[in-house]
Image (cartoon, grey):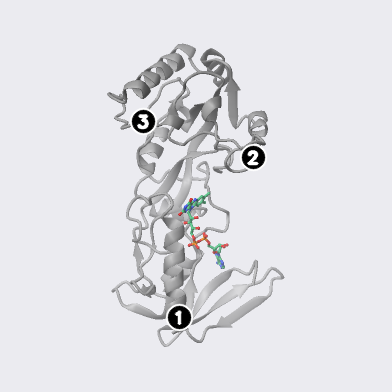
Amino acid sequence: MMSTPASSLITKDGAVVGVKASGPDGKDYTLYASKGVILATGGFSANVKMRNQYDEIWDKKLDNQVKTTNMPAITGDGINMAVKAGAGLKDMGYIQLLPTTDPATGATNHKIVESTNIYVNKQGNRFVNEQGRRDVLAKAALAQPDHVFYVIGTEQTLLKDKEGRGPYGILISDLLKQKKAFKADTLDELAKKLGMNPDNLKRTVAKWNEFCKTQKGDEFGRMSCEEGNKLPGGPYYASVMTPSVHHTMGGVTIDEDTRVLDKNGRPIRGLYAAGEITGGIHGTNRVGCNAVPDALIFGTIAGREVGK
Ligand SMILES: Cc1cc2nc3c(=O)[nH]c(=O)nc-3n(C[C@H](O)[C@H](O)[C@H](O)COP(=O)(O)OP(=O)(O)OC[C@H]3O[C@@H](n4cnc5c(N)ncnc54)[C@H](O)[C@@H]3O)c2cc1C
């Protein structure tokens, strides 16, 4: 049933037996489940109120100015419904920001160079080990002027297909027109386009190239400069970036059979949950690529359990 958000859980004698929902035509629906209800409504990255209510990492600064990579429906509905049915919560304070997103939209689709290429602030200086954890990178980026930085690349290592499209299928020429990315033949010209001090940028790139040769003594403690991170010469590219809310590690407490647990750790009969709605799976900083397996594996378990 598309565009039919669930609004509450129906309980009977302490067990969850169905959901209430409303359809796009304004019609209300009451749906009963004979074997159980599985919550799979994702996290709460797009719910500004919840972000600031629960945040324990970002000094309650995840307001409307901070974009999200998520779609607008990811507002923690399932978490709030489960809480009303008595569910316990875990790790709600751990909210992940993805450092490399579009300042205008929060999207990631303007990527054109490796995310581990050097990050340069508006003054033309590097400020962090780009191979670090997402929370470390985001914190460092938020300490830069206007929370903005540029990821620098070159023509040789550009991530583009034969039609000139980046990894998300967008023409790089369009990204340049939209000023989501910048291109210049020399570092002087690139600095001018980005409004940064050219001497700083040249010094930053020279130091970086030196590290790429020796792979030793990086001022920010990087372990390596990989082939795709090298900046051997122009034309150069820069993608404009800022951190946006990406993943919420917290959520309802479940056991290994995906049964939702109450505040005392006892299963709530008839209620199951899987995916980003659950808490305690990823610790304080979800590692990239582990969320889809989380949703798929626990979703499969939930289906099996309810189908028994
Ligand atoms: C841009 C981006 C890139 C990512 N890249 C990766 C990656 O490469 N690897 C990886 O592992 N993870 C990645 N993630 C994270 C991963 O996609 C999510 O954690 C995962 O999709 C969560 O799956 P889910 O099924 O729990 O919830 P979601 O996929 O968020 O789905 C929740 C669904 O519930 C619906 N819903 C919400 N509220 C209600 C309601 N009240 N009633 C009915 N339906 C409702 C929503 O409309 C949505 O369809 C990425 C996330 C983003 C945003």
Snapshot quadrant of residue 21: bottom right
Q: Secondary structure at mark 1?
A: helix
151 sits left or right of 189 in the view: left
Give the labeled residue for mark 2. 170
* Amino acid type of the residue tagged 1 in the rendering: Val
Q: Badge 1: how crowded within 10 Å, few (<14), some, or many (20+)?
A: some
Q: Secondary structure at mark 3?
A: loop
The structure residue drawn at horizontal position 28% and vertical position 24%, both measured from the top left corner, is 216
Snapshot quadrant of residue 301: bottom left
Residue 204 or residue 25, whichever sits in front: 204
* Figure disc tally: 3
Give the labeled residue for mark 1. 306
The quadrant of the image that shows the N terminus is: bottom right
| Residue 74 drawn above or below residue 298 | above
Q: Position of residue 300 (x, y in %)?
A: 45, 71
* Amino acid type of the residue tagged 3 in the rendering: Val
Question: Sequence order check: which comes first, mark 1 or mark 3?
Answer: 3
| Residue 278 drawn above or below residue 119 | below
46 sits left or right of 173 in the view: left
Q: Secondary structure at mark 2?
A: loop
Give the labeled residue for mark 3. 128
284 sits left or right of 69 in the view: left
Disc 3 versus disc 2: nearer the observer: 2
The structure residue drawn at horizontal position 50% and vertical position 27%, both measured from the top left corner, is 153
Q: Position of residue 279 (x, y in %)?
A: 37, 62
Q: Position of residue 233 (x, y in %)?
A: 50, 18
**Tag 3 near tag 2, CB within 8 Å:** no
The structure residue drawn at horizontal position 50% and vertical position 42%, both measured from the top left corner, is 66
* Amino acid type of the residue tagged 2 in the rendering: Ile
